[in-house]
Amino acid sequence: MMKGTIQAGFGEPREVLSIGEVDTPAVDDDGVLVQVRAASIHIGAVYGVRGLPKVMRPMFKSFIAESGVIGQNIAGVVEAVGKDVTQVSVGDEVFGSCKGAFAEYAATTSEAVAPKPTNSTFEQASAIGVSAFTALQGLRDYGNLQEGQHVLITGASGGVGTFAVQIAKAMGAEVTGVCSTRNVDLVRSIGADHVIDYTQEDFTKGEPQYDLILDNVGAHSLQDMRSVLTPDGLLLANGAAAPTGWFGGLGHPLKVTVSSVFSKQQGRAFLSRENKEDLDTLRELVATGKITPVIDRVFPFEEAVEAVAFVGEGHNQGTSVIAM
C-alpha cells in the first residue's frame, strides 16, 4: 500500500481531492515503478479535477490512474522494472510522464522516462512535463520558428511561458515576453530581449512586428492580436478564459483556427503530445543549461490538495511542485 492524492468526482480541488491509502501499482513486463521524489502540477490537471469543459471529461478520466490517483509528471528513483526492460535499472534517477504522479510510487513505461539531468533537482526535473512539451512543440512544430524571427509570448511568467521564452532564445529568436509588474524581472532573467508589463502597456497598440505570437492567455481579440503580426505572421492559441460549462473555453482557440481560412496571417490551436524523442530533446536543453525550469512553490506531499488549489488560482511563476 501507499499514499496517493485521490480524485472522487469532478469539482473544486478542496472538495473532491483527498490523500488516502491505495494499492502500490503493479509493474508490467515493459514497465517501470518509480519512487516519486517530486511531481509537478500543470494547469490542465486543475481543469481535469474540475472536469471543465464538460465535453472533455472522458479525456480527463483517461489521465487518472485506476486507483483514482491524479498527476502526470514525475521525477524520482526507479524502484523496480519489468522483465523486458533493459534501458532502465533499479536505482536510476529518472523523470518523465505517468498516470498517478501525486503519490509515493508511480508506474509507467520505460519509454516514458529519461535519465534525470545531473544539473537539475528532482523538483526541477519533474517540471519538465506538459508545459515544456507545449512550449517546444508549439514553437518548433506548429510555429515553425526560425532563427532571427521575432516572437511574442503572452503569459511569459507561467508554466508554458517560462519554458517558451527560454526555448525561443535557444532557437535564436528575438523574444518579447508579456507579464504583470511583479514578474518583469523574472521574465527578463530567463532571457527575454524585451518585456512588456501589460498593466502599463497594451502591446496590441504597437506597430506590426512579430513573426509569431504564442498566446498563453487569450485576453485580446483576434483583430487586435493580428494587428501586431507581420503580413505572414502566425498566431498560436494556447490560452483562453478558464473553461466553464460544456464547451466554455474552447471557443477562442476554435475562432483562431477557423478565421485563418480568410486571412493570410495564419492562426491555429494545438495540443502537445509527450513522446520519447522530445523528452530527450528537453533533457538535452536542460543538461546543457539552455533552459532551466522555473519553480514557484514546493509543497510537501501532505499539502497536495492545497497545491492543486493554488495552481488553480492562476498566479504561478513558472511551475509549482509537490515534493515527497
Image (cartoon, rainbow, N blue to C red):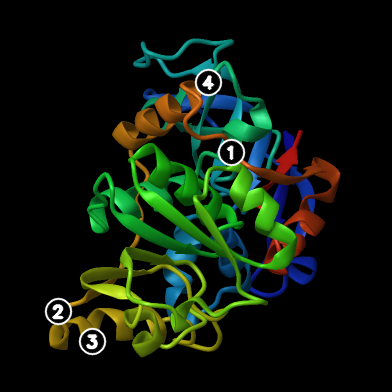
Q: Can I make out residue 70 in this image?
A: no
Q: Can I make out residue 128 in this image?
A: yes
Estimate the spatial distance between the alpha carbons at disc 3 and disc 4, rounded to whole Å.
42 Å
Seen at 60% across and 49% down, the residue is 188
| Residue under label 3 | 259
| Residue under label 2 | 264
Disc 2 is placed on an element classified as: loop
Q: Position of residue 294 (x, y in %)?
A: 63, 42
10 Å crowding of disc 2: few (<14), some (14-19), many (20+): few
Q: Nearer the viewer, mark 1 or mark 2?
A: 2
Q: Mark 2 is on which residue type? A: Lys
> Counting residues from the N terminus, which is met first, the one under dot 2 or under dot 3?
3
> Counting residues from the N terminus, which is met first, the one under dot 1 or under dot 3?
3
Estimate the spatial distance between the alpha carbons at disc 1 and disc 3, rounded to whole Å.
34 Å
Q: Mark 4 is on which residue type? A: Pro
Is there CB contact under 8 Å for labels 4 and 1? no
Estimate the spatial distance between the alpha carbons at disc 2 and disc 3, rounded to whole Å.
10 Å
Q: Position of residue 86 (x, y in %)?
A: 36, 11
Estimate the spatial distance between the alpha carbons at disc 1 and disc 2, rounded to whole Å.
35 Å
| Residue under label 1 | 293
Q: Mark 1 is on which residue type? A: Pro
Is there CB contact under 8 Å for labels 3 and 4? no
Q: Position of residue 131 (x, y in %)?
A: 49, 51
> Counting residues from the N terminus, which is met first, the one under dot 3 or under dot 4?
4
